Amino acid sequence: MNKEKISANNINVHYGDKQALFDINMKMNEKEVTALIGPSGCGKSTFLRCINRMNDVIDICKISGNITVDGHNIYSKDTKVERLRENIGMVFQKPNPFPKSIFENVAYGPRIHGTALDKTDLEEVVVNSLKRAAIFDEVKDRMHESGTSLSGGQQQRLCIARAISVNPEIILMDEPCSALDPIATAKIEDLMGELSKDFTIVIVTHSMQQAARVSKKTGFFHMGYLIEVGPTEVIFSNPENQKTQDYITGRFG
């Protein structure tokens, strides 16, 4: 059993007067894939964005409770948000490479965070990140072409390379395959399995098949509540809650 990496304790989120999350308590283990599932608007992406404090940028968003990473409360006054986001990478629903070369897309993070020592070191970081994101062989001869010239699936793997270039410990993925075709999706899913040997991964997905294929633990959200959380095979084969059962058998959602 891997040790606990992330722990959410009594997380409540309000957008203005509307409450989006109610008392969320959930633990996620190190070097595992945890999936968050549930119908649209259930709060799973809101919860994901609490883990790297992305909700902070929304003025009307109020958050109570705490989230610890390796035992440290990321909502404490002494947390440096820039450092936190260096440690927690994020990959979004729609691939969003910078309008720069493939090389510069990956070099950007190490350069602004100052983690690469010199030009040779930077090149090594870029090549290693592209290799780990299983895209190096497809782009090695076109490193100076724009990242936006790649196919959708390649762009998403480039964004994963960009996220891991600063060596985070955690990667958050918000429906990373929803804009991709089945072949590109399969590549990203294989990649998640590979990356979970080194990184803690939390993925929001609409696809229950995807959650079942890639994750060790699954949390089911409904209308802002975490209804049930447990080992993925239990959630999909023998859930305790009737709502979970109804969702996974397609009665709603």
Image: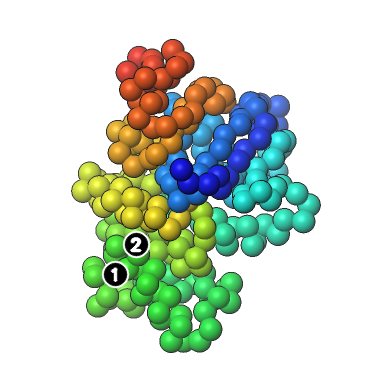
- The residue located at (34%, 62%) in the rendering is 133
Q: Amino acid at mark 1?
A: Phe
> In this image, 89 relative to 207: left or right?
right
Asked which secondary structure carries label 1, the reply is helix
Question: What quarter of the picture does the C terminus occupy?
Answer: top left
**Image spot of residue 176 (x, y percent):** 38, 47
Residue 172 seen in this snapshot: no
Residue 50: x %, y % from top left: 61, 43
Q: Position of residue 77 (x, y in %)?
A: 78, 52
Residue visible at 72% across and 56% down in the picture: 79
Residue 158 visible: yes
Picture quadrant of residue 20 = top right
Residue 133 higher or lower than 247, as above or below: below
Coloring scheme of the render? rainbow
- Picture residue at 63% right of the left edge, 26% below the top: 22
Q: Which mark is residue 136?
A: 1
Residue beneath disc 2: 133
The residue lying at 42 percent from left, 32 percent from top is: 231
106 vs 115, nearest the viewer: 115
- Is the residue 9 above or below the residue 147 in the image? above
